[in-house]
Amino acid sequence: MKKLMGLSAAIFFLAAAVNAQSSEASPTSEIKIDKEARASINKEKKEDRKALRKLKENEVSGRTEEAFISDFGNIPVTNWQRLDYFDEADFIKDGQAMSAFYDEDANLVGTATTKTFEDLPEQAQEYINKKYSDYNIGAVIFYDDNEQNQRNMELYNLQIDADSYFVELKKDNKEIVVQVTENGDVSYYTRLS
């Protein structure tokens, strides 16, 4: 009986030893885990900064107001607004309605100016009149990107990083936006409805 119990115990320990996994990790798997952990931490920090920015939703940064004066002079601002990730200043310059957008570091990201269809390059006007002849022309906006700031602005829920016109076109219940370069090249941008 003792031999049977001893044999059972030996088989049990042998099976446990065979099925046991090594707890040692290879150096490459440790590096991979470190990179994943670092990426996860960086992602959490970025999300925390965005959340903090949203918490201060109604407050426009004093630094942004100072930067605006530095960029545009002492022009009266008709409206300051905190967007999700930008401060926006609405103002009139040279008789044109404009908006300036600043990032969390109070650096100018770009400006948007209300324009007319006639402000577009002639080549673009001809193309739009021909290709979209059955559409009604709506708002025209010129976005002037600040090339010195790597941060991109969102317009119509898409990031933009180049100076361009944006033209809203409507037909029946369909509303689209086309992008026009300063050279007059026209391309489909997005659908609004």
Image (cartoon, grey):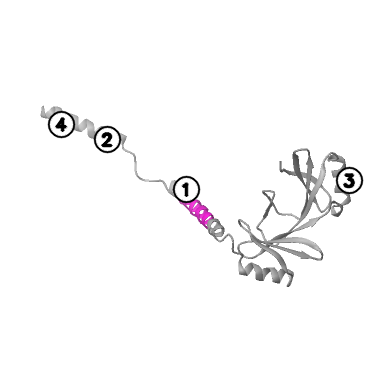
- The location of residue 39, given as percent across then percent down, is 51, 52
First in sequence, mark 1 or 3: give its number.
1
In the image shown, does 32 or 118 lie closer to the viewer? 118
Q: CA distance from mark 3 to mark 4?
A: 95 Å
Q: Amino acid at mark 3?
A: Glu
- Residue under circle 3? 126
Q: Residues within 10 Å of mark 4 (few under 14, many from 20)?
A: few
Q: Amino acid at mark 4?
A: Gly
Contact, CB < 8 Å: mark 3 with mark 4?
no
Contact, CB < 8 Å: mark 1 with mark 2?
no
First in sequence, mark 3 or 4: give its number.
4
Q: Name the element at disc 4.
A: helix
Q: Residues within 10 Å of mark 3 (few under 14, many from 20)?
A: some
Q: Name the element at disc 2.
A: helix
- Residue under circle 2? 16
Picture quadrant of residue 107: bottom right
Q: CA distance from mark 1 to mark 2?
A: 30 Å
In the image shown, does 67 or 182 lie closer to the viewer? 67
Is 126 magenta? The answer is no
Q: CA distance from mark 1 to mark 4?
A: 44 Å
Q: CA distance from mark 2 to mark 3?
A: 80 Å
Q: Main secondary structure of the magenta part?
A: helix
Query: How many badges with numbers are in the image?
Result: 4
Q: Amino acid at mark 1?
A: Lys
Q: Residues within 10 Å of mark 2 (few under 14, many from 20)?
A: few
**Which region of the structure is painted magenta?**
34-48
Q: Name the element at disc 1.
A: helix
The numbered disc on residue 32 is 1
Is 36 magenta? The answer is yes
- Residue under circle 4? 6
